[in-house]
Every structure is written in C-alpha cells, then in structure tokens.
Amino acid sequence: MQEELGNKQFFITPGHACSYLPGRQARTLFLDPRDTITPGIYQALTEQGFRRSGGHLYRPHCRSCQACVPTRIPVAEFEPRRSQRRTLKRNADLSVQVHRATYSPRFYALYARYITGRHADGDMYPPSPDQFRSFLLSQWSETLFLCGYERDTLVSVAVTDRQASGLSAIYTFFDPTAPQRALGVWSVLQQIALAQELGLPHVYLGYWIRDAEKMRYKIDYRPVELFLNDRWVRLT
C-alpha cells in the first residue's frame, strides 16, 4: 500500500458465512478501529478497494475467492444507457437536495420501511435507530445524504462520502412501494451527476460480484473501472 499506510495495523477476521455467495466462507481485512482516520488515509484505502461501514474500513480477504471486485465510475466519460435515460425521464418529477448526514426521524422512517420491505430476510432486519447510526454515520467521514423528494415527501436517500478523488456510495434506501421508479438506479445516476458538478473524477460503487444477483448491477454504468491485481482496469 502507499507509504502513509505503512505504519497502520490491520486485522483479519476468522472465517464466517459469506453474505453474498451461499455455502462459502469469507474473511475480512479491516483497519484497527482504534486508529485515527484522516481524509488521506481514507482516500488511500479507498484506492486499494476498501469500503466504509460506520466508522470501520474493511476489504474482503478470502483465501480462495476473488469474487468481490471493487468498482468505480470515471464520471467525465460516463454515458447513460437507454434504460438509464428512461429512469431519469421517469423520475423527472423528483427534486434533489443534499444534506449533511445525520440521524432524524424522517430519514430513519424511510430506512426502516426499506429494510422491512426489501431485506426482511437479511441480517439487517429488524432495523433500529442504533443500527442506522452505526452503519451509515461516521465521526471522521464527510458523509452526505443525497435525497430525492416527490413534492415534500422523501422517497430516496443515497448515503455517499465525499473524498478527494470522488464520491464513495455507501448505501441507498428508498420507498419500497415504488419499484417502477427504479430509485436505486436513479440514486446512482444522481451521485454521478453530483460528482460531475463538484469536479470529482470518480464514483466508487463498492464490490461487483458476478454470481450475486444483487451485486451485478455495479458494471451497468459504463465506462467502469475494476480493481484487479492491485490496479484499476477500465471496461468500456
């Protein structure tokens, strides 16, 4: 890793059930949570495929599996596909506001509806205010809530971290009763637009996993760059 990471301590978890691929064991490499995390450290680790969950920085570290591939979008060259243009048109009635990340009953109510409506079979159910805070918020990151509104009604929140080289898409939650809007796709497109507006070169989307249905979408935004063999490789 880069020189500024040389004195950092990392830990590896014991094997545990993989959250994405049934029947597989996973291990996770994470930065010592007692360490001080600066914007430079966060950026350097993001460039190496790490992600944030709450105040923790982690990366998959599995012995015999390389299925989790970090992805990022070079936003200056991004061209929406026909289906993505349709999603933008379908949601032209929505307005966008950017808020500093915080807990509030309004944000939590939508989050709880989303987890209950879309992920009641997952390990994030049941939702709770403490889970919201510990998963989405961090004391050391510049985290934004990119919010979609239908008139005065909050319908989506893209949680994204602003970094020197881009936005890092942490999580998105939205109205689970409006599947026709494709609000997950719309939220990625809004983060791309915000990165372009801010003059940031990338949107980091997390891990593409070819054999996990919920993670395949990461390469639907082209061009896309994949972190393979310790370098970013572009797919057009």
Image (cartoon, rainbow, N blue to C red):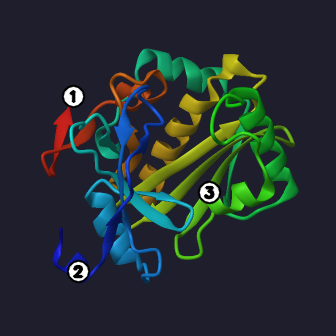
Disc nearer the start of the sequence (3/1): 3
* Pair 3/2: label in front: 3
In the picture, the quarter occupied by the C terminus is: top left
Choose top left, top right, bottom left or bottom right for residue 92.
top right
Amino acid type of the residue tagged 1 in the rendering: Thr
Q: Residue at x 49, y 23 (%)?
A: 84
181 or 172, nearer to the observer: 172
- Residue at 76% of width from left, 28% of height from top? 117
Calculate the distance from the C-alpha at mark 3 to the C-alpha at mark 1. 33 Å
Q: Secondary structure at mark 2?
A: helix
Helix, strand or loop at label 3? It is: helix
Residue 189, which numbered label? none
Q: Is residue 223 left or right of residue 91?
A: left
Residue for point 43% across, 78% down = 37
Label 3 CA crowd tier, 10 Å (few <14, some 14–19, many 20+): some
Residue 134 horizontal/vertical position (percent): 65, 62
The N terminus: image quadrant: bottom left
Q: Earlier in the sequence, mark 1 or mark 2?
A: 2
Horizontal side of 72 relative to 33 (left or right) equals: left
For badge 3, the amino acid type reads: Phe
Using the image as rendered, state which of residue 109 and residue 181 is in the foreground: 109
Q: Quadrant of residue 54?
A: bottom right
- Dot 2 amino acid type: Glu
Q: CA distance from mark 1 to mark 2?
A: 32 Å
The disc placed on residue 135 is 3
Q: Is 125 located above or below residue 166 in the figure?
A: above
* Residue 73 rendering spot, x and y as whole percentages: 34, 42
Q: Earlier in the sequence, mark 3 or mark 2?
A: 2
**In this figure, which residue is indicated by the disc labeled 2?**
4
What residue is rendered at 35% in x and 49% in y? 27
Q: Residues within 10 Å of mark 1 (few under 14, many from 20)?
A: few
**Residue with the mark numbered 1:** 236
